[in-house]
Image (tube, rainbow, N blue to C red):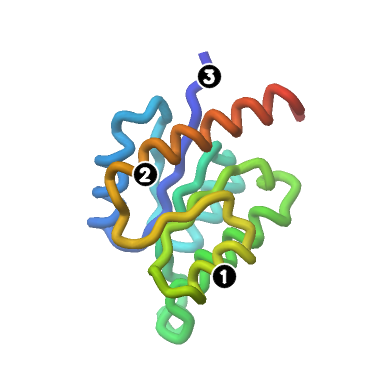
Amino acid sequence: MFQPRVLIACADRSDRYQLAEILANSLATLDFASDEGETRTKVRALPPDVLVLGRLESGDAEIADARPGATAFEICRELKCDPRTVRTMILMIVDGEPADVEQAVLAGTDDLLLRPVDRRELLPRVDAMLAVKDVRDRRDPL
């Protein structure tokens, strides 16, 4: 039987742990990435069904300091423009600032949650995204 995959990409270890704890009851296999490079590598090697995308940092500390959070929006945009990863459903976790919400939508996110994440919202949203992905994949196999 097919086991869906969820990649949790977030720079903060405690945030990754919290997200994993919430998603432990999902039927998906969980994988983790802690920075922009690891996220890109894992997504390109084996695209997840859902990418939960939080704050990420570049491998270059100067860039990360100058543009905090920018890499998550960039990764989202890249994945939605790449035919190999366009089918990956992306759930972005953003601050409640209107500019962040707008940037996430413009980057192509499939859904978003505001920080701090409400435990009651995350699991149902990821499960719904997995169901949508499954229906799309069955309807239009590669």
Q: How crowded is mark 2: few (under 14 residues within 10 Å), some or many (20 or more)?
A: some
* Whole-percent x, y for residue 135 in the image: 64, 26
Where residue 122 is drawn, which disc sits there? 2
- Nearer to us in this view, 44 or 15: 15
Where residue 103 is drawn, which disc sits there? 1
Task: Using the rendered view, name the quadrant where residue 134 is placed.
Answer: top right
Which residue does the numbered mark 3 point to in the structure image? 2
Amino acid under disc 3: Phe
Q: How crowded is mark 3: few (under 14 residues within 10 Å), some or many (20 or more)?
A: few
Question: Which residue is depicted at the point 42% across and 58% down?
Answer: 93
Question: Which residue is depicted at the point 68% across and 28% down?
Answer: 137
Residue 17 lies left or right of residue 56; in this view the side is: left
Amino acid under disc 2: Leu
* Whole-percent x, y for residue 111 in the image: 52, 51
> Total number of numbered labels?
3
**Residue 37 vertical position relative to residue 42 in the rendered view, above or below:** below
As helix, strand or loop, the secondary structure at mark 3 comes to loop
- Nearer to us in this view, 34 or 67: 67
Q: Which of marks 1 and 3 is nearer the N terminus?
A: 3
